[in-house]
Image: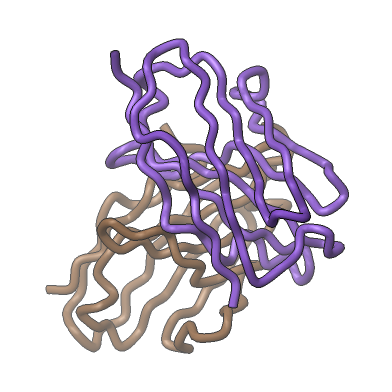
Amino acid sequence: QSVLTQPPSVSGTPGQRVIISCSGSRSNLGNRYVYWYQQLPGMAPKLLIYANNQRPSGVPDRLSGSKSGTSASLAISGLRSEDEGDYYCTSWDDSLSTWVFGGGTKLTVL
Amino acid sequence: QITLKESGPTLVKPTQTLTLTCTFSGFSLSTSGLAVGWIRQPPGKAPEWLALIYWNDDKPYSPSLKSRLTVTKDTSKNEVVLRMTNMDPVDTATYYCAHYQTANHVGFDVWGQGTKVTVSS
């Protein structure tokens, strides 16, 4: 059971917009930033969003992050086949004194 | 360009101590605001944070694993070493090291390729 809750899977067709949610509590998302990672099969996680809604250089602007209260979301617009993979949210948890991760969401492009 | 690479044994026996080395380039761990973290990922599961070591030698550990973990740095060699004692089959995972920036709350922005560790007799 992960501290941060994500849907196990989401899917969409090319060009569509999909949203991946991440639900936490006051001790993590409520007080701290959320980060989003993409993991392709056999690869290391790649940072997509930091500090709730900031994109590292090289991450396209069709990806966006937001946070409200104890929930966060990652939106991917203009869905492409190369977006297929696993997506994880993470945040620091003040009560547990550890970085906590969501269970991951598998994105399928139909 | 920042790169990191993990190295160490692929197979360890139960009760043994695991020693992994993270060799990095493109930054110095003597630079204020920087750190190197260790994160592991069991097969088919989510990542799990293990430890961080900051430029000032501050070393926060995962509370659930703190008694088993030691992280050290050699700034001159651009290396960070993670030791985990009393290994168990549940510790089987891919172990990653990652560059961590405190500035602008960037977090773990560059990861190594990971090294797969199996714990089995």
Residue B54 vs residue A31, the one in the foreground: B54
Nearer the observer, A1 or B79: B79
Q: In which quarter of the image is the N terminus of chain B?
A: bottom right
With respect to residue B89, does B32 lie above or below? below
Task: Please name the residue shown 54% across and 60% down the image.
Answer: B4
Q: Is residue B121 left or right of residue B52?
A: left
Please state the horizontal and vertical placement of residue A6, each as a whole percent of the image. Answer: 39, 51
Residue at image point 36% right, 29% down: B92
The quadrant where residue A75 appears: bottom left
| Image point (25%, 56%), residue name | A9
* Residue A67 horizontal side relative to residue A11, left or right: right
The residue furthest left is A110
- The residue under the point 45% across, 42% down is B95
Image spot of residue A55 (x, y percent): 57, 79
| Rendered position, B55 above or below B51 | below
- Left or right for B62, reference B58: left
Q: Quadrant of the C terminus of chain B?
A: top left
Q: Please tell me the colour of chain A.
A: brown
Q: Where is residue A38 in the image (x, y as percent from the top left)?
A: 40, 65
Indicate the colour of chain B. Answer: purple
> Residue A76: x and y, percent?
37, 78
